[in-house]
Image (spheres, grey):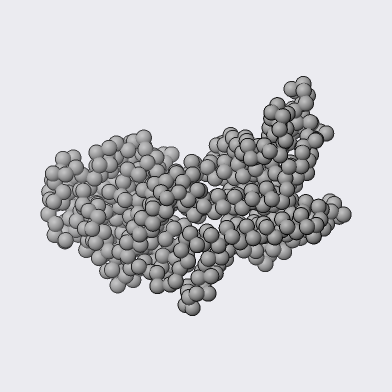
């Protein structure tokens, strides 16, 4: 009825996007095996991938659902520990290479984290704003202290305590991290572009109206939170395999803030924003390693400047669609999709 | 439409003649709510016929919106019973009442501002769209089929108000009148049996109000649903409502056809005050 424009059929859109991803993968992979990208640089690429997954998963709870959880590092830690311990123990028992168990390991890590997301989500999501932030913050601290002290309680080596969980095989590489990033982004995208995703967005925009439209608020809040935790667990699992050591002190308050900064800088509710901000901040982090603690000053300044000039983040809620850009090229008078920065 | 004959119905109510013989859509009996020591609504009893257009009027602060909030379970009533299509809603939540067939709009517009017009309507259709989260994430055929059907239906609903061309626009960027209309479309998208409109003509000019009256009649005819509206614009209320209930200080002071209401001395007193020497 309204389609006077030339449109790209949906299977073609999916094909174009898949081909572009594959091409990117092949090119970078060949650079890595050819030696043009050093081990150090490909390590940074892996880190970028891990933080993209973390930012995109936090964006579900922050950008789409509109809540402010401050315990994302806790989920990352649970995912990392459970994935690494599961893979190492199982590989020992079955006598196979740890890296071969990556897929079940990541799914296991994700599921354990999702379970914790459910446990913390049911009580926490009854609270709003600051209170939710405080509860999730406390939760992440509990996780950190738990990982630190559980060994002496159990009486045998489980998480490695303050010394950290060492000897994790470096199973994360550019190939599997890249595929994970693509899958996570795809699933988050497909979820958000369905009735379930619309329900989550509706809750963010107006809870009372969402309820009056027949959206079960507590169910969808918990669902979004659990899925956010699930993907954070996968990110944590890949992180464990990229560093080789799980150090409980790493997953403190600052780590949660760092991930939140990525989401806020990129624009809450924009996947493109989360991806680009995660990339930039991870690279900046690597460049500024020599500054160690002073990095936080730069973060704070960056955040202040962005919030002053672009309060909705770099991209607002805008999301990039290649097909939409191409359709604009085919049709002269194509309606422009408005960026949503101008809200009263 | 005007001049429908109201006939007696048990429990001191009157409903349009054509709705006799079918179960009334809403039977409210002795409804009341207290906020602390304040009784906001007391002994509210009303029956609404299956296809009736009913009006709820009264001075500011009379408790009209509170009635809507009670019917949709935003507040839990302290006393009384609400039968929706014969079913008791006592233990239902807002969401369950919505699924059972009550849809509403709000006095101060509550749209999903950052979402598109189309998405606003699709949220209304949430319950009627099939497909699990997994089928959506994996883009299974059921997702495509349901999504296509839902979008088609949403466009048809939008076309009642000639808004199908705005489907891609952001809801918060629409002009005021269009936002009010979109709220009605979103409510219709939940497939209600009764539609509660809270001041649908607020802020509209006379020609927009006239158009809205036509739209409300068309919705009533086309979907065969009951409509209950709160409104201060008397031309609209008297023009389309078949039965009117007047509320003052939380109590019904008069019920009847527009003509009866206009002549009722208690109503005149509630609106204009008591004359000297009466």
Q: Position of residue A316 (x, y in %)?
A: 60, 62
Note whether residue B278 is visible.
no
> Against B34, is A298 above or below?
below
Residue at the image position 32 percent from the left and 47 percent from the top: B102
Note whether residue B214 is visible.
yes
- Closer to the camera in the image, B157 or B214: B157
Q: Position of residue A135 (x, y in %)?
A: 64, 39
Q: Is residue B178 left or right of residue B136?
A: left
> Against A152, is A341 above or below?
below
Residue at the image position 27 percent from the left and 69 percent from the top: B210
- Quarter of the image for residue B71 reads top left
Quarter of the image that includes the N terminus of chain A = bottom left
Q: Position of residue A261 (x, y in %)?
A: 69, 54
Name, please, the residue furthest toward the right.
Answer: A290
> Against A180, is A321 above or below?
below
- Closer to the camera in the image, B51 or B136: B136
Residue at the image position 70 percent from the left and 60 percent from the top: A27
Residue at the image position 38 percent from the left and 61 percent from the top: B182
Quarter of the image that includes the C terminus of chain A = bottom right
């Amino acid at each position: 009825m309204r389609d006077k424009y030339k449109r790209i059929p949906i299977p073609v859109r999916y094909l174009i996007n898949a081909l572009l991803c594959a091409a990117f993968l092949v090119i970078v992979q060949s650079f890595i095996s050819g030696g043009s990208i050093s081990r150090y640089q490909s390590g940074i690429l892996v880190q970028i991938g891990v933080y993209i997954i973390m930012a995109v998963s936090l964006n579900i709870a922050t950008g789409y659902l509109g809540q402010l959880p401050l315990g994302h590092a806790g989920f990352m830690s649970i995912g990392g520990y459970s994935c690494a311990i599961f893979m190492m123990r199982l590989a020992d028992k079955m006598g196979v290479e740890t890296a071969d168990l990556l897929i079940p390991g990541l799914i296991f890590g994700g599921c354990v984290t999702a379970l914790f997301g459910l446990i913390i989500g049911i009580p926490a999501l009854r609270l709003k704003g600051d209170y939710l932030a405080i509860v999730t913050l406390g939760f992440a601290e509990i996780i950190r202290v738990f990982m630190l002290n559980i060994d002496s309680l159990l009486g045998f080596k489980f998480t490695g305590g303050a010394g950290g969980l060492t000897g994790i095989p470096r199973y994360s590489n550019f190939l599997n991290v890249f595929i994970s990033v693509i899958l996570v982004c795809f699933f988050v995208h497909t979820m958000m572009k369905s009735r379930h995703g619309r329900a989550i967005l509706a809750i963010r925009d107006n809870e009372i109206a969402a309820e009056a439209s027949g959206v079960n608020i507590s169910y969808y809040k918990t669902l979004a939170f659990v899925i956010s935790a699930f993907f954070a667990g996968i990110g944590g699992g890949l992180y464990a395999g990229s560093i080789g050591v799980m150090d409980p002190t790493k997953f403190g308050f600052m780590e949660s803030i760092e991930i939140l900064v990525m989401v806020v800088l990129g624009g809450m509710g924009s996947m493109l924003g989360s991806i680009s901000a995660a990339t930039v901040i991870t690279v900046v982090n690597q460049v500024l390693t020599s500054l160690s603690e002073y990095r936080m000053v730069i973060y704070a300044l960056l955040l202040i400047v962005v919030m002053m000039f672009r309060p909705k983040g770099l991209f607002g809620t805008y999301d990039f669609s290649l097909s939409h850009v191409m359709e604009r090229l085919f049709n002269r008078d194509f309606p422009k999709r408005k960026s949503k920065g101008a809200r009263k | 439409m005007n001049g429908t004959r109201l006939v007696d119905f048990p429990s001191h109510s009157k409903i349009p003649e054509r709705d006799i013989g079918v179960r009334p859509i809403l039977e409210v009996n002795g409804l009341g709510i207290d906020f602390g020591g304040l009784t906001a609504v007391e002994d509210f009893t009303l029956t609404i016929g299956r296809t009736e257009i009913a009006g709820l009027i009264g001075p500011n602060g009379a408790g009209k919106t509170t009635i809507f909030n009670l019917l949709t379970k935003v507040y839990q009533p302290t006393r009384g019973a609400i039968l929706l299509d014969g079913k008791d809603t006592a233990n239902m939540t807002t969401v369950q009442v919505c699924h059972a067939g009550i849809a509403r709009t709000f006095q101060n517009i509550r749209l999903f501002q950052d979402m598109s017009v189309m998405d606003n309507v699709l949220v209304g259709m949430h319950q009627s769209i099939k497909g699990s989260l997994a089928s959506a994430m994996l883009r299974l055929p059921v997702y495509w089929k349901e999504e296509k059907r839902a979008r088609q239906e949403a466009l048809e609903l939008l076309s009642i108000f000639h808004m199908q061309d705005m489907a891609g626009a952001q809801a918060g960027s629409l002009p005021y009148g269009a936002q009010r209309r979109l709220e009605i479309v979103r409510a219709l998208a939940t497939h209600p049996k009764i539609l509660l409109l809270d001041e649908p003509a607020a802020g509209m000019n006379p020609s927009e109000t006239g158009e809205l009256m036509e739209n409300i009649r068309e919705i009533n005819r086309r979907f065969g649903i009951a409509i209950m509206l709160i409104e201060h614009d008397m031309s609209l209320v008297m023009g389309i409502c078949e039965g009117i209930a007047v509320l003052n200080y939380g109590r019904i002071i008069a019920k009847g056809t527009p003509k009866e209401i206009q002549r009722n001395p208690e109503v005149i007193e509630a609106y204009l005050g008591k004359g000297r020497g009466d």
